[in-house]
Image (cartoon, rainbow, N blue to C red):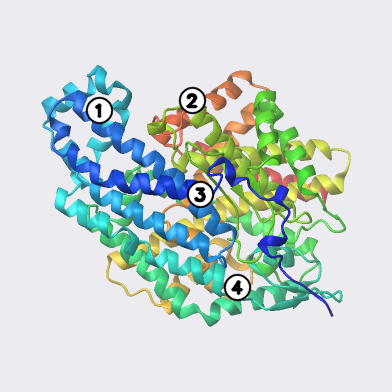
């Protein structure tokens, strides 16, 4: 029996890879900028004391620091993309480690800037904020002054900056183990073909119509995590301990408070999300029972929740066709928007397919001086790949418009609003596909099923992840040891609470918490759930043809980081400080379940 191996990087066609030459035409160009930034490190000392001398000297200090930051962003993006495209190629890892080390060095040399700004007395701060010299940097400075209670002395800030690489150790160890070292063996698809199981094709096996294939893939995949569970639990535990150490050093009362402070997001937003989602648990049980009945299963397992419940739909959409479907869905945002998106997705933004050593999953990444690149592991026979492409295109278009309309200092938007742009695009795609297949009940039901599962995965599941993070961090804050047994206990309890009796909880599923990369960037995942809630609310207005709603959303895409995220979303047309957006999205979920049930 022949085994279909994962392709090597060298075997991928150049048109299917991102074009990094727009960043650097050669490694030599990267090296030249690396030397330039390295030499800049010693120039910081000339600005010590400048913050309080005059508004003009303060401006020059800020602009020097921003110029160095802009250059190191470019170095970092190139290095991490080279590293992620093939983690078996040490050259990318070397570039990445060098730029991380350089960033730590620059952080150390520049660590005096914020403490010196925050040492300025209130009268001088007021003068600076009204000075023409600093007009462009008003919001930038206001945000720095917000952190005054959580900023240390110059000496302490320098020590923290020197510790940057060490603080990232747990995340990097997990990434190398998960993406480079772990192997999942070969698996038979039940039709005489054997494949190498990987992060990239795992979900494909969970969508197989044969329940034995789904079960075998699930068990084989999670057995690899079971074989490394003590190392993985230790790595995650120390990542959480790192979060608590940094929170205490900076004077926050909890890890969660520290994480939300930067975006100026009230704790109530987090708690309201969890509370609202948990109150709607009955509709999840109703959907799971509908799924079990439609699949004619005696019991429903986690590995049965990915397969479309509409049978005999042979989905197969090549990448180029997927791009055109994404473009058609986004036409409600304007032809200028879709022209830019199509050109980017077809000509150099996207690294399309899986290869050996490539980072799993998908993301959009770039900087002020690059394209908004997209990493994909596109699978033509998996509808989730189509949605992932549309999702990442939302991020990239958000980046494109932010960079076009904001100066460097405000060009980088927060993750809180980023997840709105991506899930907004997914909502447009679902609406477009449902209209496309309006006269095909089976295909329409297939898309409805996908939209329901998307909301289930993004709103319900990410909220469960968010509660896991909160419970795990609270445990560390209270001195509770986070062993593998404790992680399993927490996760099993949440699975039971969110899914009740509608899902059979296999013991291996308790290890899912050990394989989620986002848990190493704590209190990130709740933004997926709040993001989809805001996105569904905004998209529903735009899809009705409301021109003012479209224009408000397009304005939102241009704001970058020039406002706090809650305020930016108010410009877009939604207020996330209340519960309305989350609860309206939960109602949409229930209505979609009703519609699917009626078709079935």
Which of discs 1 and 2 lies nearer the camera? The answer is 1
Please give the residue where the numbered disc 2 appears in the rendered image: 405
Say above or below: 175 vs 416: below
Q: Residue at x 41, y 32 (%)?
A: 408
Viewport quadrant of the N terminus: bottom right
Front-lying residue, 284 or 68: 68
Q: Residue at x 30, y 43 (%)?
A: 40
Which of discs 1 and 4 lies nearer the camera? The answer is 1
Front-lying residue, 235 or 136: 136
The CA span between labels 1 and 3 is: 29 Å
Please give the residue where the numbered disc 3 appears in the rendered image: 78
* Nearer-N-terminus badge (4/3): 3
The CA span between labels 1 and 4 is: 58 Å
Please identify the quarter of the rendering in which residue 327 is found: top right
Please identify the quarter of the rendering in which residue 156 is found: bottom left
Please give the residue where the numbered disc 1 appears in the rendered image: 59
Q: Position of residue 476 (x, y in %)?
A: 31, 67
Q: Is disc 4 in contact with disc 3, using a CB cutoff of under 8 Å?
A: no
Element carrying mark 2: helix
Q: Residues within 10 Å of mark 4 (few under 14, many from 20)?
A: some
Element carrying mark 1: helix
* Nearer-N-terminus badge (1/2): 1
Q: Position of residue 345 (x, y in %)?
A: 68, 40
Q: Residues within 10 Å of mark 2 (few under 14, many from 20)?
A: some
The CA span between labels 3 and 2 is: 23 Å
Tag of residue 505 = 4
The CA span between labels 4 and 2 is: 49 Å
Q: Is residue 572 left or right of residue 1?
A: left
């Amino acid at each position: 029996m022949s085994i279909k191996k994962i392709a090597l990087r060298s075997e991928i066609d150049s048109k299917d890879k991102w074009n990094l030459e727009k960043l650097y035409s050669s490694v030599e160009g990267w090296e030249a900028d690396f030397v330039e930034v390295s030499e800049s490190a010693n120039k910081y000392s000339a600005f010590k004391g400048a913050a309080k001398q005059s508004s003009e000297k303060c401006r020059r200090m800020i602009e020097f620091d921003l110029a160095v930051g802009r250059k190191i962003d470019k170095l970092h993006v190139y290095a991490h993309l080279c590293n992620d495209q093939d983690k078996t190629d040490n050259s990318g890892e070397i570039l990445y480690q060098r730029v991380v080390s350089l960033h730590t060095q620059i952080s150390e040399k520049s660590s005096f800037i914020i403490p010196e700004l925050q040492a300025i007395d209130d009268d001088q701060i007021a003068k600076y904020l009204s000075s023409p010299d600093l007009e462009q940097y008003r919001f930038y400075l206001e945000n720095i002054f917000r952190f005054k209670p959580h900023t240390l002395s110059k000496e302490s800030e320098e020590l923290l900056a020197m510790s940057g690489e060490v603080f990232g150790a747990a995340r990097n160890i997990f990434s190398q183990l998960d993406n480079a070292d772990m192997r999942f063996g070969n698996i038979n698809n039940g039709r005489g073909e054997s494949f190498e199981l990987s992060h990239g094709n795992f979900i494909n096996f969970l969508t197989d119509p044969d329940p034995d294939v789904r079960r075998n893939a699930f068990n084989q995949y999670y057995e690899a995590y079971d074989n490394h569970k003590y190392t993985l639990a230790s790595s995650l535990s120390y990542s959480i301990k790192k979060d608590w150490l940094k929170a205490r050093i900076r004077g926050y009362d909890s890890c969660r408070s520290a994480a939300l402070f930067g975006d100026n997001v009230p704790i109530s937003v987090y708690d309201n999300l969890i509370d609202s989602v948990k109150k709607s648990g009955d509709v999840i049980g109703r959907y799971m029972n509908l799924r079990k009945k439609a699949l004619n299963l005696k019991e429903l397992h986690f590995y049965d929740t990915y397969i479309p419940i509409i049978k005999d739909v042979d989905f197969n959409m090549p990448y180029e066709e997927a791009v055109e479907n994404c473009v058609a869905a986004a036409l409600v945002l304007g032809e200028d928007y879709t022209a830019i998106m199509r050109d980017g997705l077809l000509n150099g933004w996207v690294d399309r397919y899986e290869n050996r050593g490539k980072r799993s999953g998908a993301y959009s990444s770039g900087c002020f001086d690059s394209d908004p690149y997209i990493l994909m592991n596109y699978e033509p026979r998996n509808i989730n790949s189509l949605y992932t492409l549309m999702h990442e295109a939302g991020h990239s278009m958000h980046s494109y418009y932010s960079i076009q309309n904001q100066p460097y200092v405000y060009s980088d938007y927060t993750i809180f609003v980023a997840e709105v742009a991506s899930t907004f695009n997914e909502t447009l795609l679902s609406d477009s596909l449902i209209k496309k297949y309006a006269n095909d009940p089976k295909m329409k039901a297939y898309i409805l099923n996908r939209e329901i599962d998307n909301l289930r995965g993004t709103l319900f599941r990410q909220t469960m992840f968010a509660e896991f993070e909160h419970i795990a961090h609270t445990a560390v804050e209270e001195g509770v040891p986070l062993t593998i047994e404790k992680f399993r206990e927490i996760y099993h309890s949440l699975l039971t609470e969110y899914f009740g009796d509608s899902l059979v909880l296999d013991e291996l599923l308790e290890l899912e918490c050990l394989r989620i990369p986002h848990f190493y960037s704590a209190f990130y995942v709740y933004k997926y759930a709040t993001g989809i809630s805001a996105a569904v609310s905004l998209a529903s207005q735009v899809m009705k043809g409301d021109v003012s709603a479209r224009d408000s959303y397009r304005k939102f895409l241009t704001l970058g980081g020039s406002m706090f995220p809650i305020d930016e979303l108010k410009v877009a047309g939604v207020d996330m400080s209340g519960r309305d957006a989350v609860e309206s999205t939960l109602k949409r979920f229930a209505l979609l379940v009703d519609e699917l049930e009626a078709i079935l």
